[in-house]
Image (cartoon, rainbow, N blue to C red):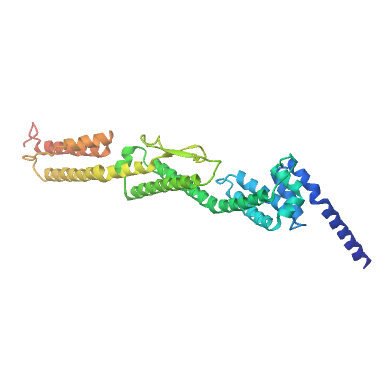
């Protein structure tokens, strides 16, 4: 029994000593020499033993306000919102606790914050000044809590969609070594990639435009971006990125959408038509070879390659395998005819 009595006495003594150590009138003069984080930590510790101290709640609200207003809304969003939420709570608490009597009684507490004097140069802070700050502080915290998430969401979605576009464009470049390879070998899967590339780019710029609109209506002081669009002119040179940074004053977008549309348009119009003509030309050559093989070689005219088709294939691909195959089949016609009508100079007879 004596042991528990002694233990209780020690605990009560320690608690009383702690309470005395954290007297507000002793700690508030130290605030000007403290960092904002130090002020927050000191006040949180103090308020844990004095929940309804008017100036402590007001000062803690101001500390939280400084933290969220100096945080980056795009990269420190969670920290900003957590401090804004705490600021809102503390300003609400201060509104309940701080009245005219409190400000007049503890004018030194409020002078340290506002640095105001009366007509005679003596420290004086009116209740209206403190009350106005509490109201504005509460409204500001609420505005940040309402607006920052939407701004950060639009920004993040823009970055994510642009990252998708960059990766899709890189995958197409890896699969097709030249622009002509892309044209001639483009299939349904490639078209799906091009559609996805166009959609990702459009989503990136749409969300970035929305981010700029929202941020223009809200003081995102750390970032004032503008963006420009660059065309993709040189295949496997333009548009290939290893690093995306949207936190610079001038953001640059490679125009993946226009490039994808251009490729699809060319494939759907010129290349599809060319493929059809290639198939028709191959059919004609194969039919001619079959006819020659089934004939005696006389009275058979070989098929000549269509000049426009030859030009188009050369223009699209200087080392066209298709054109090489056609040239071989055209030559084979001549070779088969010569073989059919060949008459030996010497006929052996017995």
Of 88 and 118, nearer the camera is 118
Quadrant position of residue 321 = top left
Does 291 sit left or right of 158 as displayed? left
User: If the image is split into quadrants, where does the N terminus sit?
Assistant: bottom right
Of 186 and 202, nearer the camera is 202
Does 240 sit left or right of 38 as displayed? left
Report x, y in % for residue 326. Answer: 21, 39
Residue furthest toward the front?
A: 119
Residue furthest toward the right?
A: 2
Up/down of 228 relative to 137, above or below: above
Please say whether residue 224 is visible from this viewpoint. yes
Q: Residue at x 40, y 43 (%)?
A: 169
Of 310 and 110, nearer the camera is 110
Report x, y in % for residue 94. Answer: 68, 55
Report x, y in % for residue 227. Answer: 44, 39
Does 329 sit left or right of 212 as displayed? left
């Amino acid at each position: 029994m004596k042991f528990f009595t002694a233990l209780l006495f020690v605990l009560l003594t320690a608690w009383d000593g702690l309470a005395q150590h954290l007297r507000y009138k002793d700690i508030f003069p130290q605030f000007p020499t403290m960092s904002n984080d130090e002020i927050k930590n000191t006040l949180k510790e103090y308020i844990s033993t004095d929940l309804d101290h008017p100036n402590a709640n007001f000062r803690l609200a101001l500390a939280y306000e400084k933290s969220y207003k100096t945080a980056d809304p795009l990269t420190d969003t969670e920290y900003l919102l957590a401090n804004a939420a705490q600021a809102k709570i503390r300003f609400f608490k201060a509104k309940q606790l701080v009245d005219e009597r409190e400000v007049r009684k503890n004018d030194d507490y409020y002078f340290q914050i506002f640095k105001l004097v009366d007509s005679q140069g003596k420290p004086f802070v009116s209740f209206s000044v403190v009350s106005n700050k509490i109201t504005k502080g509460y409204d500001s915290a609420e505005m940040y809590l309402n607006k920052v998430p939407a701004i950060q969401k639009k920004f993040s979605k823009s970055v994510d969609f642009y990252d998708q576009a960059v990766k899709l464009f890189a995958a197409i470049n890896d699969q097709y070594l030249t622009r002509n390879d892309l044209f001639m070998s483009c299939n349904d899967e490639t078209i799906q990639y091009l559609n996805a590339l166009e959609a990702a780019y459009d989503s990136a710029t749409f969300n970035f435009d929305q981010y700029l609109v929202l941020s223009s209506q809200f003081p995102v002081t750390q970032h004032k971006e503008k963006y420009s669009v660059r065309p993709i002119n040189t295949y496997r040179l333009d548009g290939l990125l290893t690093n995306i940074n949207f936190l610079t004053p001038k953001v640059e977008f490679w125009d993946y959408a226009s490039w994808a549309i251009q490729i699809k348009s060319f494939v759907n119009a010129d290349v599809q038509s060319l493929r059809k003509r290639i198939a028709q030309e191959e059919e004609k050559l194969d039919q001619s070879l079959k006819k020659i093989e089934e004939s005696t070689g006389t009275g058979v005219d070989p098929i000549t390659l269509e000049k426009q088709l030859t030009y188009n294939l050369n223009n699209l691909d200087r080392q066209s395998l298709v054109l090489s195959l056609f040239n071989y089949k055209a030559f084979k016609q001549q070779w088969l005819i010569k073989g059919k009508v060949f008459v030996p100079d010497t006929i052996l007879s017995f």
